[in-house]
Image (cartoon, rainbow, N blue to C red):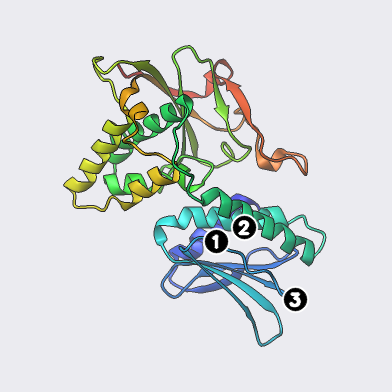
Amino acid sequence: MSESQLIATWRGYMAGSAAGLHLADAGHPLQLFIGTTDQGAPRVVIRTGARPTKPALSNVVLVERYEDRGGKWNLSFTLQDRKFDEVFLRLADDVHARSAAAPNEQAALDRVGVVFDEWRRLLKPRATGLLSMEELRGLVGELWLILNEFSTTRSIEAAIEGWLGPMGLPQDFWYDGDGFREAKAIGPSTTHVKISSEHQLDAKDLELIVLQIANTDEQTVGAINLPTMVGRALTALSDIGASADALQERIARLGVDVTETFYQDTWFVITRRTDYGVDDGFPRITASALPTGLTRVIYQIELVAIEQFKRSETEVS
């Protein structure tokens, strides 16, 4: 069962009325079950003959290890906070995919342990520090999209909850009905976009949004900086009586202190937005196409090479 098939099947279980667990892949070296609790929360159970190591994850995932009446060991993972459904599904899908080719159960369990350890380290909040100019440009661009597009067709609270990049997903945004959105912010003279992994453009219903963002000064019409964008988001949340916890958690996970002088003094202006459909034929590297053993691929795509995939282009300022 491929990655997209597993997640699509699981979403079907979550949308149904019957709780319970279902074997995800009869050909997998591990018995891996997916499904939901009685309350509808996603749950995954790994059943093995050997006693598995109980991994440490975040406090939003309940991890249980127990031996059943048949003498089998079970590792159970139940999501406690439904805001993180997408992250949880992608984590479990990664566990399934990366252990599928193991020659036996023990080797598959070893790979599962590696996957959980990588995700745990990935989702651990970064220490507070300054972003690079490239990172800051990207963060400002993502907040601009939340405030100027994604919150126009849904609440600001829902728009922020769909901002999954800071929570560890390869893509920046996911919204029900719209699919995945990956945002890239580039300078005025940049002719390419940087792709940070083999997973980033490996998704169905994916749109690539490229924002051209120039450095400027505070007096420029339309100038924005990080503190003003965060402030606007906080005000929008307050206006509808919504909690700011989701926004603040994402900012914290990025290791950002918006009161830093560097962020206050660095201003940008967004000049152009271009949207591309990541369809069949789009030049990209995907995890499924890589030879076994190759991971953590970083590459660049020249914008001129994806001209035919352009859906729209808009002058912003």
Report the residue marked by disc 3. 49
Q: Quadrant location of residue 222? A: top left
Query: In the rendering, at what x and y percent does residue 229 appear?
Result: 29, 33
Q: Amino acid at mark 3?
A: Gly
Q: Quadrant location of residue 195? A: top right
Which dot, 1 or 3, sits closer to the camera? Answer: 1
Q: Mark 2 vs mark 3: which is more N-terminal?
A: 3
Instruction: Find out whether the residues at labels 1 and 2 contact each other: C-beta distance under 8 Å.
Output: yes
Residue at x-position 69% and y-position 43%: 288
Q: Amino acid at mark 1?
A: Leu
Q: Mark 1 vs mark 3: which is more N-terminal?
A: 3
Dot 3 lies on which element?
loop
Query: Neighbour class for label 2 at 10 Å: few (<14), some, many (≥20)?
Result: some
Whole-number angstrom distance, CA of label 1 to CA of label 2: 7 Å
Residue situated furthest top in the rendering: 189
Dot 1 lies on which element?
loop
Residue at x-position 71% and y-position 39%: 289
Query: In the rendering, at what x and y percent does residue 8 appear?
Result: 54, 55
Residue 185, relative to residue 111: is it above or below? Answer: above
Whole-number angstrom distance, CA of label 2 to CA of label 3: 20 Å
Q: Check residue 57 in the rendering and tell me which mark sits there, or answer none.
A: 1
Query: In the rendering, at what x and y percent does residue 169 appear?
Result: 51, 46
Whole-number angstrom distance, CA of label 1 to CA of label 3: 23 Å
| Front residue of this view, candidates 145 and 35 | 145
Q: Amino acid at mark 2?
A: Phe
Which dot, 2 or 3, sits closer to the camera? Answer: 2
Q: Check residue 116 in the rendering and tell me which mark sits there, or answer none.
A: 2
Q: Quadrant location of residue 258? A: top left
Q: Quadrant of the C terminus?
A: top left
Query: Neighbour class for label 1 at 10 Å: few (<14), some, many (≥20)?
Result: some
